[in-house]
Image: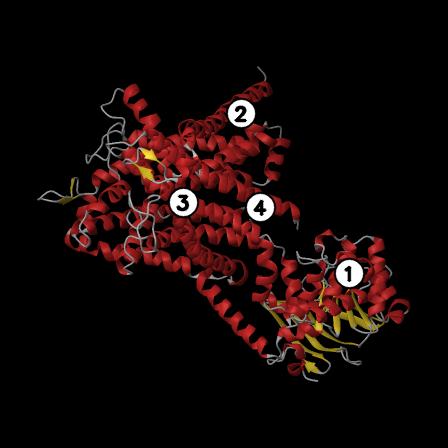
Amino acid sequence: MVNANTGSFELEDVSVAYGNEIAVAGVSMTVPPQAVTALIGPSGCGKSTLLRCLNRMNDEIGGVTVGGTIRLDGDDIYAKRVDSVELRIRVGQVFQKPNPFPMSVYDNIAYGPRTHGVRNRAELDAIVEHSLTRAALWGEAKSFLKKHAFELSGGQQQRLCIARALATEPEVLLMDEPASALDPISTQQIEDTIAELKDSVTIVIVTHNMQQAARISDRTAFMLRETMEAPAALIEVGDTRTMFTNPSDPRTEAYITGRFG
Amino acid sequence: MSIGSLIDSRDRSGRAAIRRTAEAVASGLIHASGWAAILILAAIASFLLLNASRALGEVGLLTMLTGDSWYPTSDNEQFGFVPMMAGTAWVTIVALLTAVPLGVASAVYISEFATGRVKEISKSIIEFMAAIPSVVYGLLGIALLVPAVKDILGLDTGLTAFTAGVVVGIMVLPTIVSISEDALHAVPDALRQGSAALGNTRWQTVLKVVLPAASSGIFAATMLGMGRAIGETMVVLMLAGNAGIIPGDPFVSVRTMPGTIAAEMGEVVRGGLHYSILFATGLVLFAVTFAINLAADLVLERQRKRWGR
Amino acid sequence: MSRVKRARMMESLAKGIMGIATLIVVGIALFLLGYLAYRGAPSVTWEFLSQAPRKAMTEGGIHPVIMGTVYLVLGTAAFALPIGIMAGIYLSEFAPRNLWTRLIRLAITNMAGVPSIVYGLFGFALFVMSMRLGVSLIAGALTLACLTLPVVITVTEEALRRIPRELRQASMALGATRIRTVRKVVLPAAAPGIVTGSILGLSRAAGETAPVLFTAVAFFAPMPSSPLDQTMALPYHLYIMATQAVRPAPHVVWGTAFVLVAGVSIINIIAATWRSAQRKKIKW
């Protein structure tokens, strides 16, 4: 169950290489627990690549090597004895495009718990209700739990995916541009959900919408790939308000004032 | 709290261990099945070789491939493959002459000119032809084509290489149409638009741009059709007449390699020389079709790489 | 005549010729099917489908022959589906991009091109002789399974590849293993394509004669009571009836041909319709 003060990441000199090509280099930062950390930067700057290091989803792509150290609550998640399956129970992910499974709303949310051995119907019912409530979908969804997930609207599907990720009670939720495929109203709902959630779960969100980062995040990290040859790097990380009002790096200032990106 | 101890406590039961074992077994089976194709292909080659070894030893491959008479059951038995290789060649030539012009023209029409329902319907009807069993083609040939060939051409018998070739040609039509059409379809539309923008008509575009670009695929379609024609058994068994002569033209009864195996396998002494000879025939058939299919596959592979699909 | 006009004329001419070629091909197909129906359909009665042959195949029905083919196809499915589907899963979900995988693919495409009579020889040598199964239902089913395997593998792999990658990622991000992801998410989503494609492959096996010629069939045999019995089968029955010097009544021959083609077609059409209905329901 959720334990206060867990779900913090420390990244130390993290680099990612695809084959021989280094995509991201030298990222050191901390992700504080129970807060929203936004990764911003122009497209191709390695935000999503870095995000996928945090639940080791990069493992699933052949030929990716991750260097440096990433610690979750003090433990190196790339240590040999760590099973990526166990890690992903603690670190959930929501993807760019809503990707519900082709099954009922209920089965979508029960998928994670069932995968990890929950069989009891009453327990599953409780998890489904709790997860949907946290994702602000229970009010609408309780009447169509048995419906096929594809019958939901795009915004509802994405909140279903959030609920699905919450069902394993993760300490951290990674979100890769979760609202980029949605209309403004659905985006608003997702942002509200994130604001609700951050008291109970650490959120790391990738976005290239700076207004969104400013609205919802407590901490912001700005990444940039300065030339096509150089790997992407972390330019600046800090308190969101400070970053947006008084950035310390001229490149950050140039980006957030819209001079490029 | 270390990550090792962080597996959800709900999953700490014995069931998890059972499930992990089951998954390991499933994973093992899946990996093993991946090899099934290579295993079976190797088994086919080795069993043919094993059973043909007596023939290869006693008669010799060269003698078989160059021998011009096939008297497998006479006292002075002779096992020359030339009559049946020539028969198979005539059937294949007639089949390709029937199928390639018709098939490629249809593929061009369906891919480049036909639209909407016409395209859809003709595609599914031609695809449907592939579902008709070869023995039914043989029956239809006996009923419709054999008497026609006999009467129109004034032959002693309608059971000829020509008759079998035409029917085999009809049988391989769907293969040739669908693979040629795939090849034409794979040509990027940008090329067509580029040609049209230069003031070419649709036909000029097809002739100057699309067909050359798809030529390797159409060639592969022809090769695959040829492989199927060489290996087709029932139609030639029923329609080619099975006479053991070396044919000079396709309008006589011929014996083919697949037809010979099918007709004689039931009557030979198991383990005898004739039996072994039939396996040697199968081995030659296997080697020839394998080489043809391999070549076609390499051509198609190159085409796929070229268009990046 | 202007160049443009000439080009336009050439175009009409070429289009006409190719249109006629297509018409010929389609016409041949329709004529053959029509002829088959004309000769065969009238003899298909309930009696024809449900009774055993009488009076040297001149009267009665072809029930045991139909059942023989049904048993052969079921046996083929029992061997070809598990191995073929697992091999398809391997290629789509597990196979590394290396030389071995390329060789496996090459083997599969080449297996599809091996002549059916060669499968017959192979089946005889391996299943009938070496494995001592004799000329039997099971030896024929195993032989047909080898022939059907490449179809099953190919359709499985293609159906699995149609499933978006995002679904696999979502499942793995929830901590599911690769195997569980396949079993719970990918395979159910791909099932319509796999089932339909496999049925098409199996229906082709139903019409094959050469592979069962020396592995399974007899012209006249009682209904098989065990997998080790010989069996009758529609294609072989048809072959013998069509080529024997003393021919049975023509209505039996054409009725048998019609039953074979109609059976194969009906199954194909049902399978294809079901698949397209499923695909309309789920759009990625």
Looking at the rendered structure, the kind of residue marked 4 is Arg
Relative to A28, is B288 on the left or the right?
A: left
Amino acid type at mark 1: Arg
Q: Is residue A148 visible?
A: yes
Disc 3 packing (10 Å; few <14; some 14–19; many ≥20): many
Q: Is residue B89 visible?
A: no
The verdict on a common chain for dots 3 and 4 is yes
Report the amino acid beneath label 3.
Ala
Q: Which residue is mark 3?
A: C206
Q: Residue furthest top?
A: C1
Q: Amino acid at mark 2?
A: Lys
Which type of secondary structure does the marked residue at label 4 adopt? helix
Q: Position of residue C147 (x, y in %)?
A: 39, 50
Residue density around tag 2, few if under 14, some if 14–19, many if 20 or more, within 10 Å: many
Residue under numbered circle 4:
C275
User: Residue at left 77%, top 66%?
Assistant: A129
SS assignment at label 2: helix
Distance between the alpha carbons at the discs numbered 1 and 2: 54 Å
> Which residue is tagged 2?
C15
Q: Which mark is residue A159?
A: 1
The quarter of the displayed image where residue A166 is located: bottom right
- Answer above or below: position of B253 versus B62: above
For disc 3, the chain is: C
Find residue C206 and report its image quarter: top left
Q: Are marks 4 and 1 on the same chain?
A: no
**Mark 3: secondary structure:** helix
Q: CA distance from mark 4 to mark 1?
A: 30 Å
